[in-house]
Image (cartoon, rainbow, N blue to C red):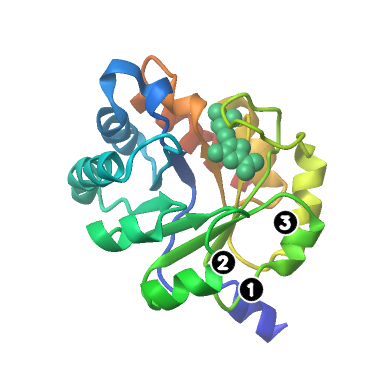
């Protein structure tokens, strides 16, 4: 189906293989920029700044610190929820949940060149994704997670596979994913895995990222 194949072509080169979502609390005294720098050395391919508790001023500072460490690796930075912050710092894009700005509104503000990611939790949300507007979907939680306040019940690998088929865009699994679970999620159709605690809470974020990257490759080879 040519139309579907075209729809899965990202508007810009997008490597979702190892997708780090930052967490200020789990990063501890190291800070999110230090964790992200280590993770980039280990093979993280995209980073999302996520801090629902931060002030606008703190987010702008954190985004700048992340850009400084990610740019040398060519790793893009997207901002969770805050289109204004993404515009203010010239970030590569945004990631939007169901309570955030609609993707079409964000696309209008950001223009065609930036990344717009959306979250999908169920079939209704999967079918509502505008594939002409969004670049990728994050689908989950695949496994139980304690990282996100108010996370939905886990959908499991089979649930991920089913939802993923409804979204003809590049997609990552999110929620409770670590290196040991990565290959199963990739084999279920994910283009990559999005992780928070598996990297942010790891004693060695570089090694953690490297292990996840290896597991992505293993899952693709299945
Ligand atoms: N979003 P961890 S689950 C940020 O289902 C986030 O939309 C989710 O953290 C969703 O990798 C989640 O530590 C947290 O389980 C994932």
Q: Which residue is mark 3?
A: 164
Is the residue under label 1 in contact with that under label 2 (CB below 8 Å)?
A: no
Taking the image as shown, residue 175 lies to the left or right of residue 94, namely right
Question: Is disc 2 surrounded by few (<14), some (14 to 19) or many (20+) residues within 10 Å?
Answer: few
Secondary structure state at the residue bearing disc 2:
loop
Residue 170 in the image, given as x and y percentages of width and height? 58, 61
Nearest to viewer (mark 2 / mark 3): 2
Quadrant field for ligand 1: top right
Tell me which label, 1 or 3, sits earlier in the chain: 1
Question: Is disc 3 surrounded by few (<14), some (14 to 19) or many (20+) residues within 10 Å?
Answer: many
Is residue 16 placed above or below 167 in the rendered structure? above
Nearest to viewer (mark 2 / mark 1): 2
Is residue 32 placed above or below 192 in the rendered structure? above
Question: Is disc 1 surrounded by few (<14), some (14 to 19) or many (20+) residues within 10 Å?
Answer: some
Distance from the alpha carbon under mark 2 to that under mark 1: 10 Å
Residue 221 in the image, given as x and y percentages of width and height? 61, 46
Secondary structure state at the residue bearing disc 1:
loop
Is the residue under label 3 in contact with that under label 2 (CB below 8 Å)?
A: no
Q: Which residue is mark 2?
A: 102
In this view, the residue in front, 93 or 5, is 93
Task: Please tell me the numbered disc located at residue 130.
Answer: 1
Residue 88 in the image, given as x and y percentages of width and height? 25, 60
**Residue at left offset 41%, top offset 54%:** 82
Nearest to viewer (mark 1 / mark 3): 1
């Amino acid at each position: 189906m040519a139309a579907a194949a075209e729809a899965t072509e990202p508007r810009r080169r997008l490597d979702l293989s190892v997708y780090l979502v930052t967490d200020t609390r789990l990063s501890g005294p190291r800070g999110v920029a230090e964790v992200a720098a280590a993770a980039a050395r280990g093979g993280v391919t995209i980073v999302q700044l996520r801090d629902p508790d931060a002030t606008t001023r703190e987010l702008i500072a954190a985004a700048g610190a992340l850009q400084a460490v990610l740019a040398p690796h060519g790793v893009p930075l997207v901002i969770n929820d805050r289109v204004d912050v993404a515009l203010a710092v010239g970030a590569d894009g945004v990631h939007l949940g169901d309570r955030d700005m609609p993707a079409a509104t964000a696309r209008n503000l950001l223009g065609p060149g930036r990344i717009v990611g959306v979250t999908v939790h169920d079939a209704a949300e999967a079918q509502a994704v505008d594939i002409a507007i969004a670049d990728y979907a994050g689908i989950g939680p695949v496994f139980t997670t304690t990282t996100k306040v108010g996370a939905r019940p886990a959908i499991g690998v089979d649930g991920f596979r089913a939802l993923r088929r409804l979204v003809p865009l590049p997609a990552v699994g999110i929620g409770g994913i670590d290196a040991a679970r990565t290959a199963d999620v990739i084999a279920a159709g994910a283009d990559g895995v999005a992780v928070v605690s598996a990297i942010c809470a790891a004693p060695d974020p570089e090694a953690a990222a490297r292990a996840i990257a290896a597991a992505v490759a293993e899952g693709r080879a299945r």
